[in-house]
Image (cartoon, grey):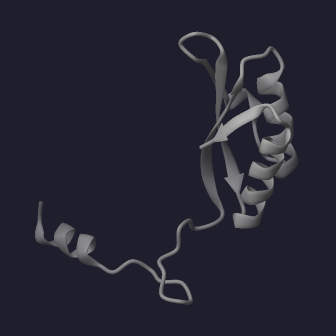
Amino acid sequence: MNDKTLRDLRRPAARQAGGKPPRIEFPCDYPIKVVGDAAEDFAATVCQIVNRHDSTFDATTIAVVPSRNGRFQSVRLTLRAQGEAQLKALFAELKGTGRVHMVV
């Protein structure tokens, strides 16, 4: 490691109003994992909801991973996040389906 790398690591993080570093800089690619009960239409339901919140979302890029015993599925995807309000609305709609157990 050279001296320039050390200086870069010690540089203070950018600050928001109020003195806190920003959590996420928008817009950005935002990966999420949606976990719910396994069903044939679970991934399609998740994709429809995500598409309402991000019109550029490409459903062909998702990965559906079943749990070890097959009771649950996780849908892993990346969307283009424009702001915190968008993400909160997306998470609320996903949880509001009653089919989603967790959004990570």
**Which quadrant of the rendered structure holds the C terminus?**
top right
Q: Is residue 7 above or below residue 68?
A: below
Identify the residue at horizontal 48%, vertical 81% (top origin).
20
The spot of residue 25 in percent (x, y) is 57, 68
The spot of residue 64 in percent (x, y) is 65, 22
Q: Is residue 35 above or below residue 27?
A: above
Q: Is residue 83 visible?
A: no
Q: Is residue 12 above or below residue 93?
A: below
100 relative position to 55: left or right:
left
Identify the residue at horizontal 69%, vertical 52% (top origin).
80
**Which quadrant of the rendered structure holds the N terminus?**
bottom left
Q: Residue furthest top?
A: 69
Q: Residue furthest left?
A: 2
The spot of residue 82 in percent (x, y) is 72, 62
Identify the residue at horizontal 84%, vertical 44% (top origin).
96
The spot of residue 38 in percent (x, y) is 72, 17
Q: Is residue 81 visible?
A: yes
35 relative position to 14: left or right:
right
State the image quarter where residue 39 is shown.
Answer: top right
